[in-house]
Amino acid sequence: MAWLDFWPTTPRRSAKRGAWCSTPNGSSGGIWAAGTGLAANVPDPTGHPYGRLFASTGNGSFNAAPSYKNSMNFGDSNFRLDLANGVPSMTTTTGTTVGDDFTPFDQARLDNQDMDQGSGGTLLLPSAAQRQQAPSGASG
């Protein structure tokens, strides 16, 4: 189970701003990332100034499907978290929501054989044609 905790960057770091869990109603689904950080971008600084985070999870519980809810499990997935109002949270009314994900069609087999894709980090690739949608890739 992977938890992303969000803390303010001001000198007074007394209170956590929010959190998100990859498998809130399941197990495993850790973010290994091979020593890399989370990938992030801000495609629309004016209309969506808090941006998006991208990551991959290792083997674990999976039951996610559009329309995404923060109670779903995202094991063996590449996902995008859309940050709203700069206050990430597990509740969709106050912050972080899964905007999109990719999970292999054989996720159950990958999970059972411990062949997770999330051991590598996520990389955002530049897009010269359209800055709004940058492709991403992960290896593991």
Image (spheres, rainbow, N blue to C red):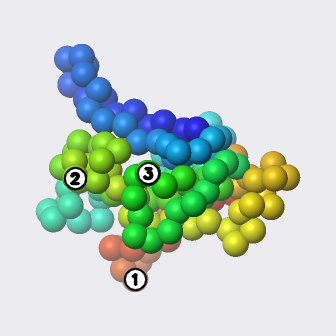
Dots 1 and 3: beta carbons under 8 Å? no
Q: Residue at the location (76% across, 53% down)?
A: 111
Q: Which mark is residue 129?
A: 1
**Residue ID for mark 3:** 71
Disc 1 residue type (three-letter): Ala
Q: Where is residue 34? Give x, y as percent.
A: 66, 41
* Image disc number at residue 93: 2
Marks 1/2: CA distance? 33 Å
Horizontally, is 126 left or right of 34 in the view? left
Residue 13, given in percent of the width and then of the height, sits at: 25, 19
Q: Position of residue 25 (x, y in %)?
A: 53, 45
Quadrant (top left/top right/bottom left/bottom right) for the N terminus = top right
Does the CB distance between marks 1 and 2 fall below 8 Å?
no
Tell me which numbered mark, 1 or 2, is placed earlier along the sequence: 2
Up-down relation of residue 44 to residue 59 (above or below):
below
Q: Which element type, helix, strand or loop, lies under badge 2?
A: loop
Q: What residue type is labelled 2?
A: Thr
Spatial CA distance of label 2 from label 3 is: 13 Å
Point 74% across, 61% down: residue:
108
Residue 21 picture location, percent across and down: 47, 42
Q: Mark 1 vs mark 3: which is more N-terminal?
A: 3
Q: Residues within 10 Å of mark 3 (few under 14, many from 20)?
A: some
Rate crowding at label 1 as few (under 14), some (14 to 19) or many (20 or more) other CA atoms within 10 Å: few
Residue 122 visible within the image: no
